[in-house]
Image (tube, rainbow, N blue to C red):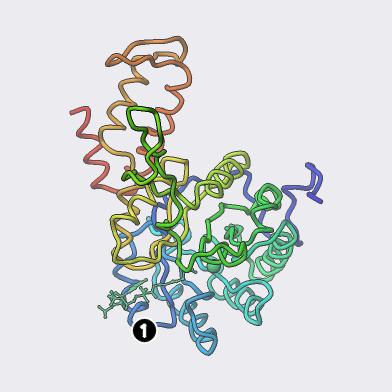
Amino acid sequence: MTRPAKDFFAPLAVGAPAPLREIPARPSRAIHFFDPGNEKMAAKVPDMVGTVDVLLGNLEDAVKAENKEKSRQGLVDIGKANAHLGSTAGPTQFWTRINSLDSPWALDDLTTLVPEIGDRLDVIMVPKVQGAEDIHYVDRLLAQLEAKAGLTRPLQVHAILETARGVANIEEICAASPRMQGLSLGPADLAADRRMKTTRVGGGHPGYLVRQDPPRDDLGVQQYDAPRTSYQQDLWHYTIARMVDACAMHGIFPYYGPFGDIKDTVACEDQFRNAFLLGCVGAWSLHPVQIKIAHQVFSPSVEDVAHARRVIAAMGDGTGAVMIDGKMEDDASVKQCQVMVRLADELAAIDPDLKALYDGIDA
Ligand SMILES: CC(=O)SCCNC(=O)CCNC(=O)[C@H](O)C(C)(C)COP(=O)(O)OP(=O)(O)OC[C@H]1O[C@@H](n2cnc3c(N)ncnc32)[C@H](O)[C@@H]1OP(=O)(O)O
Ligand SMILES: O=CC(=O)O
Ligand SMILES: [Mg+2]
């Protein structure tokens, strides 16, 4: 059961910081995953600060069981050594993905990270969230740890949607705590949990398609042997759409998750763009090559921003209807344009290249 409205924003431990009333809309086009226990990856982190919206130290899947403690300690060391990473200090947010709540490591992850680098971390990503009870557990524990550590800013929580039960409980997960920052699609674990017959980490599948009807001959008889076009469909459309609605309803942010075919940068871009168009604000990057793709896809194009500004200017107080380039614009299309321009402004505030591009529109 959710807390009554009067208690929703009350701290869950004496001395814990007051929960946020609103989740800040900070640019997070790419959530770049790295293993803090992997020396090669960790060595690259200082130079990546300022070049990517989010750096996420991953402690869960993709980190071998025997390296869990090493990765956790590596994350603490990185947090302490990089003053411009995380908190409100700079343009790159600092997130972590802890181990799943039923694992032998999740408790130590939280009880180590919050006192050591809780003042630096922005968001804790929690995998395999099944329902509100998982968020309630993390919520209370974080409040106790924040109070003990004397933190003044509450940590935010991000849930990965990667079980059938999690998808079924999506609204209650989003509503479970004022800490909820957003949701990511976890297509790999979700596919396994749903018993989908795929073996990939996100992306499409050539077998999931719709085929054109057989053409008819002059007598109207269908030609079943004739060549026909088929169109590959998006396996993730349903879940992403549910996620976008649930997040929008609760004032939090939806993200596409991982795209495992690192070499297929074209399909990665397509998958990210589908998510962008449907309302997601970002995606995961598993390899440095995917950062650029996410930054590009999740930034509105110059053409879209230019058009949106024209519509807003033409619409005055935002009511009524006008004709621009042969198309009708009205109260509803101007609201879409406002979404686009707001995002462009937020991104321009942290990305000088984009600022120059968007400023150049009016020049
Ligand atoms: C289903 C899920 O849960 S998805 C989330 C969990 N998975 C992850 O986090 C995976 C993160 N990524 C990785 O582990 C790696 O990118 C891999 C295993 C996919 C590929 O690694 P490699 O084979 O080393 O890739 P590649 O040879 O192209 O790497 C080039 C360089 O980039 C570095 N690099 C690769 N990935 C990353 C990364 N995510 N962050 C920083 N540096 C990286 C490599 O260490 C290498 O460094 P070097 O030039 O000093 O040798
Ligand atoms: O954690 C991500 C996934 O796809 O599983
Ligand atoms: Mg997963």
How many marks can you see?
A: 1
Q: Position of residue 25 (x, y in %)?
A: 48, 45
**Front residue of this view, candidates 291 and 167:** 167
Q: Quadrant of ligand 1?
A: bottom left
At x 52%, y 75%, the residue is 61
* Vertical side of 326 occupied by 266: above or below: below
Residue 37 visible in the current orientation: yes
Q: Residue furthest left?
A: 363
Q: Residue furthest front?
A: 219
At x 22%, y 39%, the residue is 357
- Secondary element at image label 1: helix
Residue neighbourhood size for the residue with mark 1, other residues' Cα within 10 Å, grouped as few (<14), some (14–19), many (≥20): few
Q: Is residue 2 left or right of residue 82?
A: right
Residue 124 visible in the current orientation: no
Q: Position of residue 84 (x, y in %)?
A: 38, 64
Q: Position of residue 30 (x, y in %)?
A: 39, 57
Query: For residue 48, what is the image quadrant?
Result: bottom left
Q: Is residue 234 left or right of residue 175?
A: left
At x 60%, y 78%, the residue is 112
The amino acid at mark 1 is Glu
At x 35%, y 20%, the residue is 311
Label 1 sits on residue:
39
Tell me the quadrant of the picture where the C terminus can be found.
Answer: top left
Q: Position of residue 110 (x, y in %)?
A: 62, 73
* Vertical side of 106 occupied by 342: above or below: above
**Front residue of this view, candidates 128 and 206:** 206
**Front residue of this view, candidates 255 and 166:** 166
Label 1 C-beta lies within 8 Å of the nearest ligand 1 atom: no
